[in-house]
Image: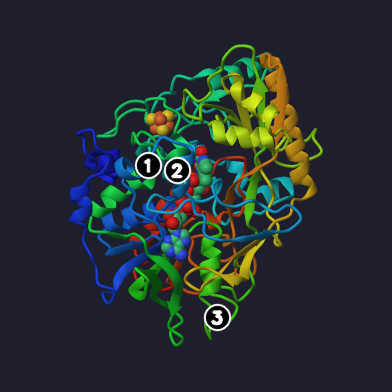
Amino acid sequence: MSVRTRNESAWLLPNDGTRTNHRLRRDMRRYADEDEVDIVVVGCGAGGGVVAQRLARAGWSVVALDAGPFWDPDADWVSDEAGSHHLYWTEPRVIDGDDPVPLGSNNSGRGVGGSMVHFAGYAPRLHPSDFSTSTVDGVGADWPIAYEDLKPYYEQLEAELPVAGQDWPWGDPHRYPQSAHPIGGNGEVFVRGAHRLGIEVKVGPVAISNGRFGNRPHCIYRGFCLQGCKVNAKASPLITHVPDALAHGAEVRADSMVSAVAVDERSGLATGVRYFRGGVERFQRARVVAVAGYSIETPRLLLNSASRRFPQGLANDFDQVGRYLMVQGAPQTAGRYAEEVRAYKAPPPEVSTEQFYETDPTKPYRRGFAIQCVSPLPITFAEHVAAQGYWGEPLREYMRDYVHWANLGALCEFLPRADNRVTLDEDTDRHGLPIAHFSYSQGDNDRALVQAARGTMEDIHRAAGAEEVITIDRYAHLVGGCRMAADERSGVVDADQRTFAVPNLYVTDGSVLPTQGGANPALTIMALAARVADRLSAGRRCGVRS
Ligand SMILES: Cc1cc2nc3c(=O)[nH]c(=O)nc-3n(C[C@H](O)[C@H](O)[C@H](O)COP(=O)(O)OP(=O)(O)OC[C@H]3O[C@@H](n4cnc5c(N)ncnc54)[C@H](O)[C@@H]3O)c2cc1C
Ligand code: SF4
């Protein structure tokens, strides 16, 4: 099936130099709260956006609620680092644990399109081994599905975003629908250093169009991918799935903060969601509810949906909601070169290697890491330098030198731990809802992986000719918290992403991942969502357990 017959979004965007099809939004179908729609989707990001599009196309009546705005790239986004702060979810959250994870700009987004609006654009698949790390490596967890279950959906999504890259030799070797982009100074440094060390690297895979795609123009290499691509070259559900959803009758209701999923005490079925819009609490009725609010907000919403039937939180009879939340260890290493690198003159995602992704039996740790180009803009680079303790005049000196620095980032597979979890805090947000409390601690394997990744990145820089190398530790990509499992004592949802406890309640975002590999998660989240939608439209419309 051609991309366009499955998803016409790229052809529904304007081709007159503007970025938004205002007519499609103005004429969008609108449902009344008292209409019982087939499905209400909470959150219109990577997972929610795909579910809304697929089910609208399958003829379902769909309402997707998002707490943030319905972005218009022309009016709302600026190619400016400081001016893009409004893209992030900056509502209060509490962090603790032995290794607290800073939340905010580096973690989740708000508004239609979700975190992919400001994601970097890397779009790798997981490896087949990621689905059975417990069996294969004795760590992590086995998924209740296998790589082969997701493979057709990976292929669909790679065509729809579309993904550009060289033929991929790692995991399940595969090709990409678009050829690789040309690379800039940062990518050249990575390739040079890696080749000198005998490390195999490939250009891509990035969800950035390398050529016109429908009415979307190709990338113009301005490097503002993390500020929301004003060009529409980088993929996000706002442009890759929402237009087609609207054209097929979905309503995307922005600025709607869902406060609880309601469940009928007698039937045990979800009946819809309560949400705040314009300062008023409302209720949307639905036959099926899909929660896709991101790994922190999804468990928070289920915990905030406690009732007489579910006193510990919705679908939380076995104390699984919020647990096994994962981040990837994401140290970044900057190298200073005599020549100008001008890393910002390209998309931050360019070149990557998965040579160290799998367990190496000669190493003292299990599982592995990927290494990728990252090209922080000046404010982020200043944070990197300041984290080394440089301040005042020395910091200014580093910043004057900004164009000479190249940056590499690793994604280390941190293992799932039951105590790394979201609970509800005593503090409340502006709606009076308890906020998320996220506790995180690393294990020995996690720390060993970070050390190995730091050493490899520093070696690559030195081999490429760096005169000075500085590394900071950081985290990326929260997933898990409502994981998929074989039974209700070890997870929240089954292999169809249906909660064990409530037959018509689904979780369709990154919360369901039991492990994360060393891969950026968005493509996997979208592929999983497309799979759930397929299964729902193939006959589970009423959410009755089969
Ligand atoms: C700076 C940055 C760079 C990244 N780079 C990459 C990358 O290169 N590659 C990659 O694969 N991934 C990357 N990611 C991660 C990726 O974007 C996320 O993993 C992915 O988008 C998560 O998908 P999701 O469906 O779980 O949630 P999201 O896409 O975040 O969508 C959740 C949506 O739910 C809404 N919401 C939350 N709570 C509620 C509520 N109660 N009511 C209504 N709406 C609600 C939010 O507003 C949001 O729009 C990056 C993330 C960041 C922050
Ligand atoms: S570099 Fe390309 S993908 Fe990134 S913001 Fe610019 S045009 Fe968009």
- The picture places residue 468, in percent across and down from the top left corner, at 72, 20
Mark 3 vs mark 1, CA separation in Å: 41 Å
Give the secondary structure at mark 3.
loop
- The picture places residue 18, in percent across and down from the top left corner, at 24, 37
In the rendered structure, which amino acid carries the disc numbered 1? Trp
- The picture places residue 72, in percent across and down from the top left corner, at 31, 46
Residue drawn at 51 percent across, 63 percent down: 298
Mark 2 C-beta closer than 8 Å to ligand 1: no
Q: Which residue is mark 1?
A: 77
Q: Is residue 274 above or below residue 54?
A: below
Do the residues bearing badges 2 and 1 touch, measured as CB atoms within 8 Å?
yes
Residue drawn at 45 percent across, 71 percent down: 259
Q: Is 137 in front, or is 425?
A: 425
Ligand 2 falls in quadrant: top left
**Residue 538 can be seen in this image:** no
Q: Residues within 10 Å of mark 3 (few under 14, many from 20)?
A: some
Q: Earlier in the sequence, mark 3 or mark 1?
A: 1
Residue drawn at 42 percent across, 27 percent down: 222
Quadrant assignment for the C terminus: bottom left
In the rendered structure, which amino acid carries the disc numbered 3? Phe
Q: Which residue is mark 2?
A: 84
**Residue 304 can be seen in this image:** yes
